[in-house]
Every structure is written in C-alpha cells, then in structure tokens.
Amino acid sequence: MTILEKIIANHSKFNTVKPGDIVDIFIDARAARDFGGANVVKHIEDNNLKIDDVNKTYFTFDTNPTGSDQKYAMNQHIIRRFARKHGIKVFDIDKGIGTHSMIAEGLAYPGSTALTTDSHANILGAVGAFGQGMGDKDIAAAFSKGRVWFKVPESVRINLNGKRTEGITAKDIVLNLLNRFGANSLLGNSVEIYGEEVDNFTLDERITISSMGTEMGAIIILFPPNKEVLDYCSTATGKKLAGVYADADASYKETFDVDLSAFVPMVSLPGKPHDAVNIIEAKKVKIDSAFVGSCTNGRMEDLRDVAKVLKGRKVAPGVVLKIVPTTDEIWNQCLDEGLIKIFKDAGALVSNAGCAGCAAGQVGQNGPGEITISTGNRNFPGKQGKGSVYLASPATVAASAVAGFITTVDDIPAEPATFDVDEKLDRIEKAFTEKKVESKPAVIEGRVWVIKEDNIDTDMIFHNRYLTITDINEMGQYTFDNLAGYEDFAKKAQPGDIVVVQKNFGSGSSRQQAVDCFKSLGVQAVLAESFGAIYERNAINAAFPILTYSTLDGLDIADGDRIKVNFETGEITNLKNNKKIRANPFSEVQMEIYQNGGLF
C-alpha cells in the first residue's frame, strides 16, 4: 500500500484498502475554526449530538484572531461558551494558525489522522499525517462519532530528481510544480514526493509545499518523514514515533520524474496560483504592497529569510509591507532573535499570529487597483482583497518591498522605485468604475445554465466576506457574486434551475455555504466534469444533488435548454432535442444520504 492507504487502513476496520473503497476512518484530532465552528456547534445542538471524546476535539481561532469583525466576534463567543460547557480545548486568538498548532502541540504526527474546517488541513502531509479540510456537517459528525466516511483516492508518486540550484526556495519548488501540473491534473489524488534532495527538506519547507496541494487539486501532498520530522514530532507528542512509509511494491496510478535542477525562481500571476511563470516575466512590475505570512510561508525559516533581506534596508516609499507569523510561538522566537526589530526598523507592520491576508478583514487585504506581492497560497480574484496579487517566496517578497517593484534578492536596486501618482490614481479609478459584464439570462427547471469555465473556486461561488452568515435563507443572494460575468446570477436564477460547469468545480475553501447558497436559491443540481474533493463531500452530506459527467458531446446543450436528470441511472436528456448522455449516477452512499435528507 501507499502511505495514505496505510494510514487509512490503520484507522479503519480493514487490514488493507484500495482506491475507490469507501471506509469509516477513526480521526485522532477533530477541530473547527472560528468561521466554521459556530455552524458545527449549531449542527451538534440542532441534532442533539454528543461529543465523542473531548480530549481529541478542538477549536482554533485563526481566520480572524483580532475579532475585528463583529460577526466573527459573535461566532467566537458562541464557540467559547460551547467549549466551556463541554470541556473542549480552544486555541484562542493568541495561538495562531490551527494546522500549525496541531503539529506544534503534537495533535498531528506521522501516521495520524486529523480533520478541520480548514481546506489546507492537508498541510499535515508535511509530517506524513493524513489531514483533510471538510465542511461543518462532516466536522460535527467527527465531533460526535469520532469517525467519518472517506473514499480512498488514487495515489501518484512524484520523483524530484537532481539538486536544486542556489536560491531556489520551497515556494519556488511548489510554484514550479503548479506550473508543471496545473490546478486539476492531480485532481482528487494523494501525492507522495520523493528524491535525494527531498530527504533533506526541512519541516518548514515541507509545510510550504504540502500547504499548496489544495491549489493543485490534490487530496494531499505527503512526504515520508525524515529524522528531523520524527524528532520534532516525537518531542511534541512525548512519544517515540516511527512514521508510516509506502511499501516497496506500492501501486501508484502514475509516477512522474521531474528535474529539480531545472527549477527557477517563480511567481504566480494575478488570478490563478497555477499561472506560475519564471520571475523574469514579472520583474519590474510596480507594487503597492507586500505581504509575508499565511499557512504557506509564515514559518521561522521564512521570517529569517525576510530579515536577511530587510536588515539595514528600508521598505520603498509608498509601499506597505505586512508581516504575520503563523503561530505565537514563532512570533516570540522572532522577538527573541531580534527579527521584530529588523522588521520594524525597515518600516514593516507586524501583526499577531493568524491566517491574515487569506481571511477577509485580516491584515494583508488590498484595495481596488492595488498591486500586491504575497507569500500566500491563493491569489484568486477577491481572495486577498479587491486588487491584484502575485505569489512569491518570502525572500522575493521582501526584496520587492525594498525595491518598490517585483525583483529578486540578487537584483535589489541602490535606489527604490518611486510612484507615478497619476498612473496609480488612474489604476484605482479604473478598478472602481470598470463595468461588470451582465450574465445572460438562463431559463431553467427545464432551464439550464451552461458555464464554460474550469476551476470555479469557492471564493467565486460564495466569497469569504460572507462566511459569518449562518442562516441559509440569507446565503442565496451572494451566489456567484465574485465570478466574473455571473455577478447577477442570484437575481436571475429561479427555483429548479440546473447549473452545468466544467472541471474542478468548488475547489478552494471548505465552506459549506458554497453548497447551501444554491439550496437557498432553489437550484436543484450542479453537474460538472469534476468537483473539488471537499466540495463534493459537502454537497453529498447536505443532500444537494451533484453528478459528474465525462463529456457533454452528443447532448447539444445550450443556455436555456430544458434537461432531465436521472440520479439512479445518470441519464441526462436534453428535452429540446431528446438527445441523451450518460453521466455517473449516485453512489449507494450518496443515494442513502440524499434519501435521508442529509448526513443527519
């Protein structure tokens, strides 16, 4: 078996598992964050559920640790009261990012399983653990039962051959991989990474790479634990750990040999993490702001790299640099090592530990027309604000902040770039006045919306600025308001509409609202070539009909056509011309949950 298959088998009633098996998995650590936690509490209370084991159950406040938004503050208060009542531990606003705390506190370790409402819980693959982000229904079920159902994915092996060249960081490595594999060629697969150089990757480097598995569409990116990881996790848990490793004859769906020595410094162009290019293509782009942080790059090694660049230098005039460590432990280590003084002397803003720019309302957001270079994991439109976001390594972000434009550490100018005030004002004005393209009206119940786009992520479906909404009746009005060309979808949609999309629909965050907003509008189904793994679970658990198809060829379908869908057979009929295709019907599990009206 592969690493993931072994971990799943070890936490199930089976000695062996294979891709496609659906099994109940025991979960070692079950957590909910501040934005999803209140919904988890609601599901538990509404369904009179009990807590399986309070010693394995946690809440983490990382999306808005400042409590600067009143709805977040309210949700945090709901969670604190529930946690006090049941004796559940809360990693409160002073702790930092939950997945990082799980590693530091020994809750996630090689061979273990963990769930949280964070779509980047697969970051735990960095220590050889099975981590998954899931929606609030799944997390409530895990809190109550200690187990969740899971479909064993196919495994893919990537061999990174050769040595990396000088200056190639872990962020460069994962951006090169994104450039190679894109957002959906590894969709739904567990990925294991091997190589002579990989054995020497530090824990911080592994975390950076694993944390962007979500952006590659992977279930998880797993590293076989090396001595450093085993020693770190053994200390954190107080137990001698051995780790879980793939068998020599493990079966992989595919094996890819990739030349690590050919990797170059990279940036992701605004809008898509996988639109990664050689940094040469983005050099000299004038920036307004820079951000260092997120679960991908706010670790100690990252911040030391930033300090090396900033020491004795100043942030360019007119540029704002924001730095947010991942955990309070790392924040204090920066203080002890004198890094905070270097940051402040350079003119940077340093905030308390947390998710920061990835979460609405937190430090790192930008405004319309603003150009930001960021160490975050996502630069989807609207994810880190209203402006444009380039993704890069911490050292590149720091160098760019000093230069005033995108550049590398070895090419920082003696004098920083200055702003062309008129150009900046024109850019901001354009961002405010750009007309939105109205979506074409769709006629459904028979009517269908055909949206010809891949990789429609959850921020496009239901933006993170609405995450504190827990009433399903309020959700529909915000559906697709961050998807270009479909901003008026909620106003045009009618009960009974069916939405047809393409590959990787619902990638990104674990938010349940991205499913429930369609239910709120009365949309009756979404059909896609493939779904983001978390989104698929959320939809099935909410009894919201989703089906996958291989091709629409032969259906001759267009906006406004009437279609009929058979969940049992998968047959889709275009009632306009009576043409038919066969999609994948409901699985037994999906049909059972659907007939039950939901997971509960």
Image (cartoon, rainbow, N blue to C red):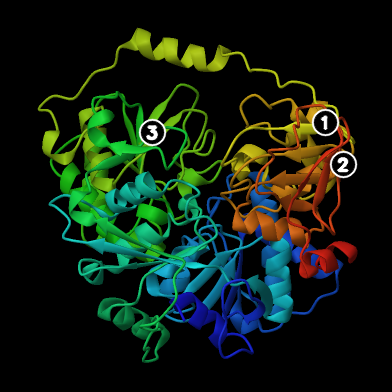
Q: Residue at x 52, y 55 (%)?
A: 187
Tell me the amino acid under the disc marked 1.
Ala
The earlier-in-sequence mark between 1 and 2 is 1
Q: Is residue 52 above or below residue 306?
A: below
Residue 508 placement (x, y as % from top left): 56, 49
Q: Secondary structure at mark 1?
A: loop
Residue 556 placement (x, y as % from top left): 74, 32
Q: Residues within 10 Å of mark 1 (few under 14, many from 20)?
A: many
Q: Residues within 10 Å of mark 3 (few under 14, many from 20)?
A: many
Which of 229/404 is in front?
229
The residue to which callout 2 is attached is 522
Which residue extends farthest top? 422
Q: Is residue 113 left or right of residue 534?
A: left
Q: Residue at x 28, y 56 (%)?
A: 258
Tell me the amino acid under the disc marked 3.
Leu
Query: Is mark 1 in CB contact (under 8 Å) with mark 2?
Result: yes
The residue to which callout 1 is attached is 493
The residue to which callout 3 is attached is 269
Q: Secondary structure at mark 3?
A: loop
Which of 598/425 is in front?
598
Residue 450 placement (x, y as % from top left): 72, 32
Q: CA distance from mark 3 to mark 1?
A: 32 Å
Residue 48 placement (x, y as % from top left): 85, 74
